[in-house]
Image (cartoon, helix red, strand yellow):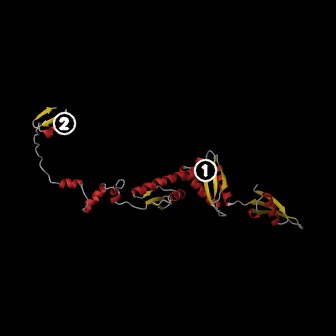
C-alpha cells in the first residue's frame, strides 16, 4: 500500500500517523490536505502518498513500459554494494535485449533519465536480462586478449568496431595490466571505437619469421651484406676460381694396392675401367 487518508488534529500528526500506517519514514511521506473540519477542535484530513526513491521510479518506469508494449516480462530490483541492478525475467526478455544489447542500453539510458528527474541515484544503475551483461563481458574479454596478441605480434595497431561505453570499459579493463599493448578510444559517438596499440613497433629488420635475425637467418645475411661484413655462401662460390674438368686416367685393374682397396669396398658391382666394363 502506497497511499492512505488520515485525519488528525494537526498536519504534523497526520503525517506521523500516515507514516506509521504505511511503514515508511516521515521524510518519505507526501501529504496533501483534502479538507479541514471543526470550529473549536479543528481536524485535518490528508491524503498521504509514499515518495518513490530514484531506484523505485526506475523499476516502475520499466514495468510500465513492459505493460504498454504487452510483453511477458517483469523487472525486479536488487541492491548490491556498488550498484542497483534491475533484472529482467520472462520469455520476452530477448526482445528487450535486442541485437548485441542495443535495445537494453537504450532502455537503461531512458531509465536513468527518469530515475534522476527529482532525486539523484546514490549508486550506479545497471539494467540486465538473463545475465547478458556477464556473458558479454566474458566474450569481450576473450576478444580483447586475442586482438592484443595480434597487435603485439604484428607490431601494428588493431582497430575494433564501434562500441557503447559499457563494452569499451570492458575492453579497457581486460587489457589494463597488459605490458605489451595499450588501449585508446578514438572517434565520436556513435562511432567511437577502441584502438589497441603495441608498445613496440617492429621495423623492417626484425620482421622476419620467428626472429631470423637472431638465428643468422635471411634478414641477418641481408644486413651483413648491406654493411659489407659477414659471409655469403653464394658470394664465396661465385668468387672461387673456376678450373677446367680433368680427364679421368684409366686405372690398372691388376695393380695390387688398387685391387686390395677394391675388395675392401665390396664386389659384385659394375666397375668401369677406361673403355671397357667388367663384372666381378
Residue 118 horizontal/vertical position (percent) = 67, 63
Left or right: residue 10 compared with residue 158: right
* Image-quadrant location for residue 278: top left
Left or right: residue 254 compared with residue 103: left
Q: Which residue is mark 2?
A: 263
Local secondary structure at mark 1: strand
Left or right: residue 212 compared with residue 104: left
Local secondary structure at mark 2: helix
Q: Give the numbered dot on residue 129.
A: 1
User: In the depicted view, which residue is nearer to us: 144 or 257?
Assistant: 257
- Residue at image x 45%, y 54%? 147
Residue 93 horizontal/vertical position (percent) = 61, 47
The mark closer to the camera, 2 or 1, is 2
User: In the depicted view, which residue is nearer to us: 229 or 157?
Assistant: 229
Give the answer, above or below, for where 180 lies relative to 129.
Answer: below
Structural distance between the alpha carbons of marks 2 and 1? 90 Å
- Residue at image x 30%, y 54%? 218
Amino acid at each position: 500500500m502506497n497511499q492512505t487518508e488520515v485525519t488528525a488534529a494537526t498536519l504534523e500528526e497526520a503525517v506521523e500517523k500516515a507514516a506509521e500506517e504505511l511503514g515508511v519514514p516521515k521524510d518519505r511521506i507526501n501529504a496533501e490536505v483534502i479538507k479541514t473540519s471543526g470550529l473549536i477542535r479543528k481536524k485535518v484530513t490528508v491524503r498521504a502518498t509514499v515518495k518513490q526513491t530514484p531506484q523505485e521510479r526506475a523499476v516502475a518506469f520499466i514495468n510500465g513500459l513492459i505493460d504498454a508494449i504487452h510483453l511477458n516480462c517483469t523487472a525486479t530490483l536488487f541492491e548490491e554494494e556498488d550498484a542497483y541492478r534491475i533484472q529482467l525475467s520472462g520469455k520476452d526478455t530477448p526482445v528487450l535485449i535486442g541485437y548485441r544489447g542495443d535495445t537494453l542500453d537504450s532502455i537503461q539510458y531512458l531509465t536513468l533519465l527518469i530515475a534522476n528527474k527529482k532525486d539523484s541515484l546514490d549508486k550506479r544503475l545497471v539494467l540486465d536480462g538473463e545475465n547478458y551483461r556477464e556473458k558479454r563481458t566474458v566474450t569481450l574479454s576473450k576478444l580483447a586478449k586475442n586482438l592484443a596478441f595480434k597487435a603485439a605480434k604484428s607490431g601494428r595497431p588493431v582497430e575494433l568496431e564501434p562500441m557503447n561505453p559499457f563494452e569499451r570499459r570492458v575492453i579497457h579493463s581486460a587489457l589494463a595490466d597488459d605490458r605489451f599493448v595499450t588501449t585508446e578510444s578514438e572517434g565520436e559517438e556513435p562511432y567511437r571505437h577502441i584502438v589497441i596499440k603495441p608498445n613496440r613497433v617492429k621495423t623492417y629488420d626484425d620482421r622476419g619469421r620467428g626472429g631470423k635475425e637472431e638465428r643468422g637467418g635471411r634478414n641477418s645475411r641481408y644486413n651483413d651484406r648491406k654493411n659489407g661484413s659477414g659471409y655469403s655462401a653464394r658470394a664465396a662460390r661465385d668468387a672461387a676460381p673456376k678450373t677446367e674438368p680433368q680427364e679421368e686416367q684409366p686405372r690398372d685393374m691388376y695393380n695390387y694396392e688398387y685391387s686390395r682397396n677394391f675388395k675392401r669396398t665390396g664386389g659384385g658391382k659394375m666397375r668401369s675401367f677406361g673403355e671397357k666394363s667388367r663384372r666381378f
